[in-house]
Image: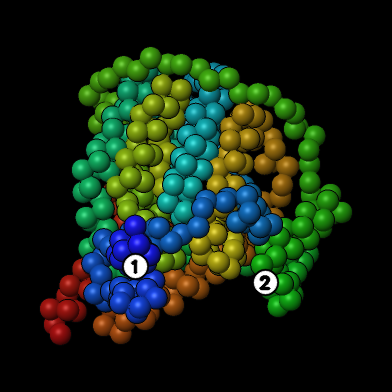
Amino acid sequence: MTGSSHCRLLRPTRLWLYRDAGQRSPLGLYHRPRQPSASHRSAEEQQRMNENSRSALRPLSDSSPSTVVAGFIAMLTGYTSSLVLMFQAGQAAGLSAGQISSWIWALSIGMAICSIGLSLRYRTPVVVAWSTPGAALLITSLPGVPYAEAIGAFIFASALIALCGITGSFDRLMRRVPASLAAALLAGVLFNIGSEIFRAVGVQPLLVLGMFFSYLLTKRLQPRYAVLAALLVGCLIAGVTGLLDFQRFSLQIAVPVWTTPAFSFAAVFSIGIPLFVIAMASQNMPGLAVLRAEGYQVPASPLISTTGIASVLLAPFGSHGIHLAAITMAICAGPEAHPDPDKRYTAAAWCGVFYGIAGIFGATLAALFAAFPAALVLSIAALALLGSIGSGLTQAMQQPNEREAALITFMVTASGLTLFGIGAALWGLIAGVITLLILRRRN
């Protein structure tokens, strides 16, 4: 074979390889294809390219002291704010200490698995928590109902929630809610918690003011560690002034207790349906509003269906339901957790880790959290939520034609209104939507 024929045979193959690689050939015959601009790509193509361009999942390297602290504060806030409700409901219903411990274990393990799994799956700070209004409901509705039938009502409510997630009905509903109203809902839900720090000044002025000014000074010098500095200063002041009391604290591992469910119409109507309505209106809707307000567009359906299915599986051990959190999710999703929004998912994952640890020792949680003064817990939660409250109010007031509706949503939600057993979050959203419809019709 001659040299010229050898070159003729190889040249097309050579050019073809260059063309496929998207490079220019030696003869300049092929060039890199033009990539379509973002405006010419479909939404699905853009989403696929964004997902492909994301780096590998590295939760440990993405973590920082601020995300660990945010996760711990979220866990601490969730348990200290409403753990006592479970004990009150269990004692009012005549449950044994083992059943109450199993109840807390089931909730904690479910919250741990869902928070870690969903946060890593979507790289979004998804925090799952038990239904605090649901626990308050059980204080009055659980006594007089056989525990097995109450478990059956828990399963019924959780199955309805899972069905809403699987069918996508909740996702379609939330897509119709304007972003300004969702942001106002977030700010209203968090407002009362944020203002607690100023009420706590009258109870423990040295402790609260010390935490507040340490937060401000650190915020000026090292903003990432402002909440951590406030927590450390608060623990130091509480220890020096004798406000920490660990005398009743002892480690006891929780043991799950199985209860075979039974179903009755009375329990379903008195416990199951109210739990479903409260969970969707007071937990899942505000929780998704928190994510939307912080810029996370994770689909709602898999979040709702996952927590619903987990609640069904854990109900025989006492879980009355785990759902999207609002206040604790805002702690992990806000700028105080991490300046980079793409790394805040690690705060929620760490919250899940702390949930799991707390669940293992569920029998001693009340004594542990009782060791911290209430003013310290309220103040650190308020400081951790300042950024989320500010961003929520900012986003709520951005659209001039939606400003009044957003303001009404914020005011009703922040008022703490409870009507027909339904909390202020749903009523605030309803009031804002009605206001928006009336004003738009007028315009």
Place of residue 162 in the rendered image (x, y in percent of width and height, measured from the top left): 29, 37
Residue 440 screen position, x and y as percent: 17, 79
Tell me which amino acid carries mark 2.
Pro
Left or right: 18 as drawn, with respect to 439 = right
Read off the residue under disc 2: 223
Q: Is residue 168 or residue 196 the one in the foreground?
A: 168
Vertical side of 393 occupied by 236: above or below: above
Query: Mark 1 and 2 residues: CB-CB less than 8 Å, in contact?
Result: no
Q: Residue at x 83, y 51 (%)?
A: 239
User: Quick one: quadrant of the N terminus?
Assistant: bottom left
Q: Nearer the viewer, residue 49 or 150?
A: 49
Q: Is residue 104 above or below residue 223?
A: above
Q: Secondary structure at mark 1?
A: helix
Q: Which residue is mark 1?
A: 4
In front of the other: label 1 or label 2?
1
Taking 316 as reference, is 436 left or right? left
